[in-house]
Image (cartoon, rainbow, N blue to C red):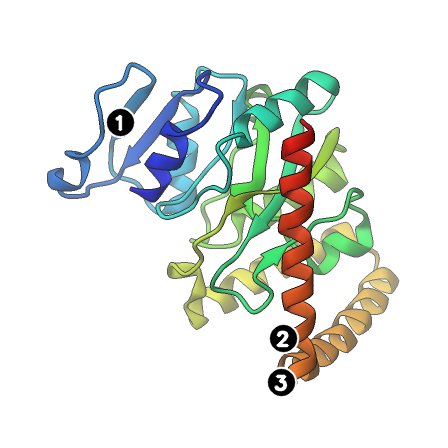
Amino acid sequence: MATLQSVLGQDCGDWELIIKDGGSSQSSLEAIPLDPRIRIIRSPDQGVFDAMNQSLEHVRGDWVCFLNAGDSFSHRSALAVILEHARHDECAEFIYCDVAKPTSRSGFEKYPDQLGYGYLFSNMICHQAWFLKSAYYRRTARYETKEISGADRRFLLRMVLVYRVQYRHVPMVLITYKGGGISQRQVVHQRAAAWIDELVRELYTAEEYRKLHRRYRVRTVAKRWLYDTGVWRILRLFRSIRAHRDSAVRLLLG
């Protein structure tokens, strides 16, 4: 219900909500209000990315954002902010924002303005923070369904590094990511990591891969050391305060 309420509470009312039901009990859908902007699509699927692909067949709007059950917009003005950025940059087909992650060690994710080879080698942008033009989905391939996890990162790698999509970063925390789910299972995570690595090795030269992989290992060790000390908790507190303060200020300034 948190997901639904965050959509219904948006200041911008120009939205459509497609709810993909892969076989839940009818009682879980009874609380959904009657609203011409809300449509329920009932059909079996083979996982979250198959469900996302099926949902895309029913999209009527110009922009698409996928929220999993439990994820939500962090502010009532989230859609209005994204729409304003889309109007200011008509060439952008991909807009992404920052994300609150209450259950993670960091508490949130602040993404860079530039998505370069170095960053994308070992980093992901939550697909919940993506606002992607529906025309782009219609023009390119849909999400792969070989594995039940990892298709969003493979999609992002191809979208930015291969197809060179025009993108824009909105440096505001507009999405709250619940986390958890099947992708957190160790076996699923390992299979997804191997699948993603296959594509990374295709997109990067052998020398780039070796160099960036060494850098990734060093950073991983450093982060683990920070996580196990009070230093990280202090840094997390200050970073979280600053991130939410900056987002609030930008919302007030419009």
Q: Which amino acid does label 1 sit on?
A: Ile
Marker disc for residue 228: 3
Residue 10 locus on image (x, y percent): 44, 27
The image quarter containing residue 82 is: top right
The image quarter containing residue 147 is: bottom left
**In front: mark 1 or mark 2?**
2
Residue at image coords 66%, 48% = 245
Q: Is residue 130 left or right of residue 88?
A: left
| Residue to which mark 1 is pinned | 40
Q: In this view, does 139 lie to the left or right of 18?
A: right
First along the sequence among labels 3 and 2: 3
Q: In front: 78, or 157?
A: 78
Instruction: Say whether marks 3 and 2 touch (CB < 8 Å).
Output: no
Q: In front: 240, or 17?
A: 240
Q: Looking at the figure, which quarter contains the N terminus?
A: top left
The image quarter containing residue 226 is: bottom right
> Label 3 to label 2, Cα distance in Å?
9 Å
Q: What residue type is labelled 2?
A: Arg
First along the sequence among labels 1 and 2: 1
Q: In this view, does 171 lie to the left or right of 103?
A: right
| Residue to which mark 2 is pinned | 233
Instruction: Say whether marks 1 and 2 touch (CB < 8 Å).
Output: no
**In front: mark 3 or mark 2?**
2
Q: What element carries label 3?
A: loop
Q: Looking at the figure, which quarter contains the C terminus?
A: top right
Q: Is residue 59 visible?
A: yes
Residue 123 locus on image (x, y percent): 68, 57
First along the sequence among labels 3 and 1: 1
**In front: mark 3 or mark 1?**
3
Q: In front: 79, or 150?
A: 79
Instruction: Say whether marks 3 and 1 touch (CB < 8 Å).
Output: no
